[in-house]
Image (spheres, helix red, strand yellow):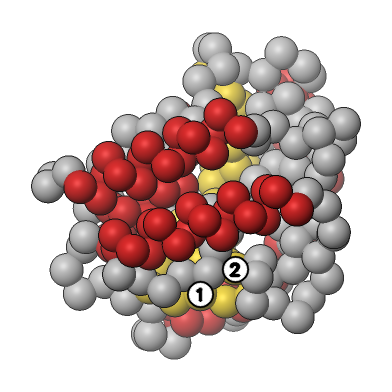
Amino acid sequence: MKLSIVIPVYNEEKSITTTIQKVLQAPVPAGITKEIVAVNDGSSDNSGTLLNELQNDTIRVFHLEKNSGKGAALRLGFSKATGDIVLIQDADLEYNPEEYPRLLQPILDGQADVVFGSRFISTGPHRVLYFWHSVGNNCLTLLSNMFTDLNLTDMETGYKVFKKTFLDQITLEENRFGIEPEITAKVAKIPGIRVYEVGISYFGRTYDEGKKIGWKDAVRAFFCILKYNLRRS
């Protein structure tokens, strides 16, 4: 069995080498091989060059000519992934690759088709940061749950894991962070799909440290929840 780890990268020259190293070293259950699919999203710093230097048989690198957003990078990465299971890994190390076994276990046990890593049901360490971000996240998750009839605690999480056969059943459209509620809405519409959550730790960044999501993305997420849940197809 192969695990494809898709990493969207935009201006992460300070962390991308460490991220790749940690992903390579991350534990996975016996019998699973890893491939890394890194997508440089038109970075204006040295990220693309660093990725090219890291490229080998395990680390496959793709480039978008201009910055198009996390959603666009993920779409490209998903299309290039060859694994049986696909895991999203952000390049900024807010999420810990050491927790891959926890994320994969419900799928490997035959219980889940999709797993969300929740920052809000974990006993692991969490950096204490922006209060209004957490309020917004909770409100968006609640609104999403009202439409999907899922009882998620963290719809916006960056850790999402899929059986590739189910990921291939959805067509994604969002270019930026609206990809998170879009994925959730479209996954929820797949008949018989089994969605699980597991607790994860979270090492958030400040804006000075490179955090990119902002209030405009929250507004877009609200719109995406309505758009992709109310739309029939």
- Front residue of 168/50: it is 168
Task: Pick whichever, 150 or 113, lies toward us.
Answer: 150
Would you say the residues marked 1 and 2 are in contact, meaning their CB atoms lie under 8 Å apart? yes
150 shown above or below 178: below
**Residue 230 in view here:** yes
Residue 8 locus on image (x, y percent): 59, 37
Q: Is residue 96 left or right of residue 192?
A: right
Query: Mark on residue 67?
Result: none
Mark 2 residue crowding within 10 angstroms, few (<14) / some (14–19) / many (20+)? many
Q: Quadrant of residue 84?
A: bottom left
Residue under numbered circle 1: 197
- What residue is drawn where x is 45% and y is 62%? 142
Q: Which residue is located at x 20 percent, y 74 percent? A: 192
Secondary structure beneath dot 1 equals strand
Q: Is residue 173 left or right of residue 123?
A: left
Query: In the image, what residue type sits under mark 2?
Result: Ser
What residue sits right under mark 2 in the picture? 118
At which x and y percent is residue 82? 40, 50
Q: Residue at x 83, y 40 (%)?
A: 206
State the quadrant of the C terminus: top left
- First of labels 1, 2 by sequence position: 2
